[in-house]
Image (cartoon, rainbow, N blue to C red):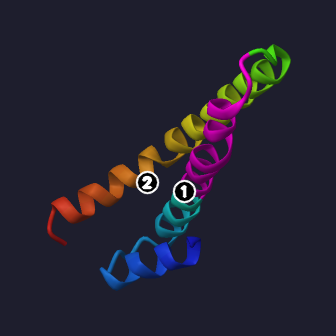
Amino acid sequence: MQQRVTNRLSEFAYADLDSAIRIGRHTAEIAVLGERFANVTLPLFLTLNRENRDAVAEVILAIKSELDELRDALVDSEQNVAELVEFFHSGR
């Protein structure tokens, strides 16, 4: 996925290769983290027996950890995404 994003940016003549690589890496990471949360962690939380408090507590910790990872990935991508927005906004 990372390479596909980088290649796609190249198709738009986004010339900052280092930035394109970072955007590809960050967006791929965000996609993987989001998919894991949506397909594994959240469904697990929703299906656990509420009387199994230890398991629920573990899943809650996993939710916090995954959301922290997702936040960090989003923060890490902000500068490069802002540059990309500026690139498209300026009509280059």
Q: Position of residue 23 (x, y in %)?
A: 49, 61
- Using the image, tell me which numbered label, if any, was put on residue 78: none
Residues shaded magenta: 29-50
Number of numbered discs:
2
- Disc 1 marks which residue? 31
Question: Which residue ends up furthest to the right in the rendered image?
Answer: 54
Q: Which tag, 2 or 1, sits closer to the chain's start? A: 1
Residue at 74%, 28% in the rendered image: 59
Examine the structure image and report whether residue 49 is included in the region drawn in magenta.
yes
Mark 2: which amino acid?
Asn
Tell me the mark number nearer the camera, choosing from 2 and 1.
Answer: 1
Identify whether 4 is placed above or below 43: below
Q: Residues within 10 Å of mark 2 (few under 14, many from 20)?
A: some
Q: Position of residue 3 (x, y in %)?
A: 56, 77
Residue at 43%, 54% in the rendered image: 80
Please name whichever residue, 27 or 9, is drawn nearer the observer in this view of the structure.
27
Q: Is residue 69 visible?
A: no
* Helix, strand or loop under label 1: helix
- Disc 2 marks which residue? 80
Residue 67 is left or right of residue 77, and the answer is right
Residue 71 sits in quarter: top right
Q: Position of residue 60 (x, y in %)?
A: 70, 23
Please name whichever residue, 55 or 62, is drawn nearer the observer in this view of the structure.
55
Q: Position of residue 85 (x, y in %)?
A: 27, 56
Q: Residues within 10 Å of mark 1 (few under 14, many from 20)?
A: some
Determine the CA span between mark 2 and mark 1: 16 Å
* Helix, strand or loop under label 2: helix
Mark 1: which amino acid?
Ala
